[in-house]
Image (cartoon, rainbow, N blue to C red):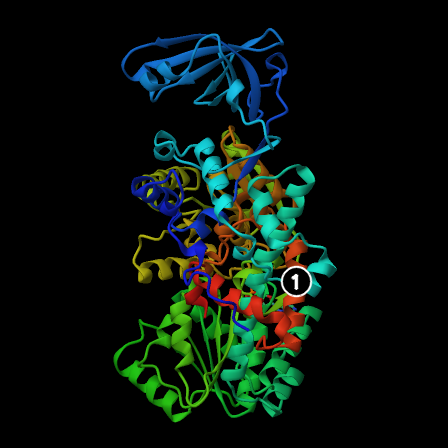
Amino acid sequence: MSSPDRNKVDILDRSVAYLKGIGPAKANLLAEELNIHSLGDLLHAYPFRYVDRTKFHRIIDIIPNEGAVQIKGKLKALNVKGAGRAMRLVGRIRDDSGASLELVWFRGINVLQNMFVVGEEYIVYGPVQEFNSRLSITHPEMELARQAPTEVATFEPVYSSTEKLNRRGLDPRGRRKLIRALFLELKQADLPEIIPAYLMQELRLMARGPALRAIHLPGNQAELDGARRRLKFEELFLLQMRLLQLKVVREEQVAGYSFGSIGSIFNEFFQTKLPFELTGAQKRVLKEIRADLGRGIQMNRLLQGDVGSGKTMVGLMSMLMALDNGFQACMMAPTEILAYQHYESITEYVEGMDITVAFLSGSIKGKARKAILERLLAGEIDILLGTHALIEPWVEFKNLGLAIIDEQHRFGVKQRAKLWVKNKPYPPHVLLMTATPIPRTLAMTAYGDLDVSVIDELPPGRTPIQTVHFTEHRRQRVFGRIREEIAKGRQAYIVYPLIEENEKLDLLALEEAYDEMRDKFPPPEYQISIVHGKMKPSVKDAEMQRFKNKETHIMMATTVIEVGVNVPNATIMVIVHTERFGLSQLHQLRGRVGRGAEESYCILLSSVKLSKESKERIKTMVDTTDGFKIAEADLRLRGPGMIDGTQQSGLLQMRIADLANDGRILSVARDRAKDILETDPRLEKPEHQTLKIHLDRYMKGITGWGRIS
Ligand code: ADP
Ligand code: MG
């Protein structure tokens, strides 16, 4: 079947230097600046926008600060102005509307001055600003009107570029030349179809070769749309194929303990100890976990649930399933205080039952540690709660059946891998829990090889948190609100930003704020705790504990309180410099209040001047407390790479698909990939051969891929 090897090296693997007009110097530059090495890299570096060369703005109609415009007009003047750092080249261009506009360059003045000719007609492209009521474009793209390509010139691709590339002739125009040269070299056979024919037909996708050509050199809008849809589908489909393939392979290879029975421990707890009715979502998720644990395949499940949705109880009841089958279980949290909180609440839940619960962390040393380790190995401890310390090699279980990782985004992938070797012959089942809601499209991608359960319901009886936005000059009013809450016997959080680069300044600001607060809330009537990341963990924990014990009224903190701390009596949170926090962080922070039955408040303080994005973030926080809605907004505002809890995945750097907007295509791609792997898990059918070959090849090029598998 193998086709005669025309040339052993795939043409797409060749260096870009293979193209006419590109020597080693330019090839190096492309590699350094844009990570483009081969012809394939060049082919897959898609344009980020297109210019419709037939449409021009009239200068007289231009509204400044509304993005880039394209105009056509005569260069009326060109002069060097200013001196030293203020030296600049200033041109004036006038179009048929009779109005004119300034063009300004700060770099390359000599070269440009000789390049442009006064009196010639130019096509000018760039964002328009207004200075001293004059319109201007800084460093515009310029092209002689009579030189503009006349062939298929409707849509011209524009590629990302850099100053260096521009200077060496690889500006957008140079890149277009390169792409044309590339397509002269490529034959149809170089761009084979990889999506199975029946899918192509059913989804009416544009064929691969034409789509790749049209994404660079579209003839018209319809062709461009078709090419986009096709290439987005391809990208998402291949990714989902690979993720699901990994899952198939893992399930074939990684057997696990089968927890066949739900026995007396679980039932005793359920019937006599459970202090509340489970929510519908908790029940559903427990069923999913139970089914997973009974399959004889190692479980790898991600449990997503908003702050306060009751994940701990789900974790505990899953651990009881392990105990019922004669196994030990453990649960880890990222900080000592959180882990100890789990220890306390779980000890209380199972009180009176024949279950031994223990706590272990790095701070438990010497004899105490030795005793725990011995009892653990002897099987005398049923449930171990603790910090990351639990994954250290010196922690040995007798028979670990289930490991739970709380706030999993704080654990590295490598650390997770350490868990797998904790037991013989089978690795323990693993349940990852996260309070950072991740939009569905992201979860399918970043965690595409895991099973995902979602708790999408809060326990009843919570009064929603009221969120308001104040600008800083109304802080006196805010202090008043805090006093009212304290007078009612409640406590308050005040949260300050701390950015690593700014650490010193931020800490200074925190100290100043502390002095101010001591002024406004003087002792002995008021007591204030202060906690930040630079404190010793033991000091920090002690301060937190004081607040928990109601010895202090106000907790001033940087974002260290972000994760999981439970102080139901705290009913008001003030976030200072809200504009400096990200959305998901704000959501996590706010989750610290509203934990009891009392009405709770979150006050977002910000400066008066806010960027559009900050306004959007604050509005989202005021409008909703739904973590998933907030996550969707975050994805829209910041793009996928920045969403907490997914950075380590590396799978989110897509070439053309956009997880914020292509959810529908992604769903179809995932469903189709599932169908294929269900009927042909090893891709052995003839109609799947090109797909199989391409998958292996394609995945090599994806950064961070290896860390997942
Ligand atoms: P998270 O999902 O953020 O870890 P927790 O497990 O800490 O949430 O639960 C938050 C609070 O809700 C705890 O005080 C817990 O006892 C309570 N809780 C959990 N499930 C229920 C339920 N079904 N009904 C009432 N309260 C519940
Ligand atoms: Mg929790």
Residue 309 in the image, given as x and y percentages of width and height: 61, 64
Judging depth in this view, the residue of 19 and 277 nearest the camera is: 19
Which quarter of the rendered image does ligand 1 occupy?
bottom right
Which quadrant of the figure has residue 218?
A: top right
Location of the C terminus by quadrant is bottom left
Judging depth in this view, the residue of 66 and 702 nearest the camera is: 702
Q: Is residue 395 above or below residue 23?
A: below
Residue occupying the point 58% across, 11% down? 95
Residue 241 in the image, given as x and y percentages of width and height: 58, 67
Residue occupying the point 65% across, 50% down? 229
Going by the image, does 109 lie left or right of 153?
A: left
Residue occupying the point 57% across, 23% down? 69
Going by the image, does 623 lie left or right of 174?
A: right
- Residue that sits furthest to the right in the current view: 202
Give amino acid for label 1. Leu
The answer to whether one can see residue 307 in this image is no
Q: Is mark 1 within 8 Å of ligand 1?
A: no
Q: Is residue 391 above or below residue 163?
A: below
Mark 1, residue position: 458
**SS for dot 1:** loop
Judging depth in this view, the residue of 692 and 447 nearest the camera is: 692
Residue 8 in the image, given as x and y percentages of width and height: 41, 63
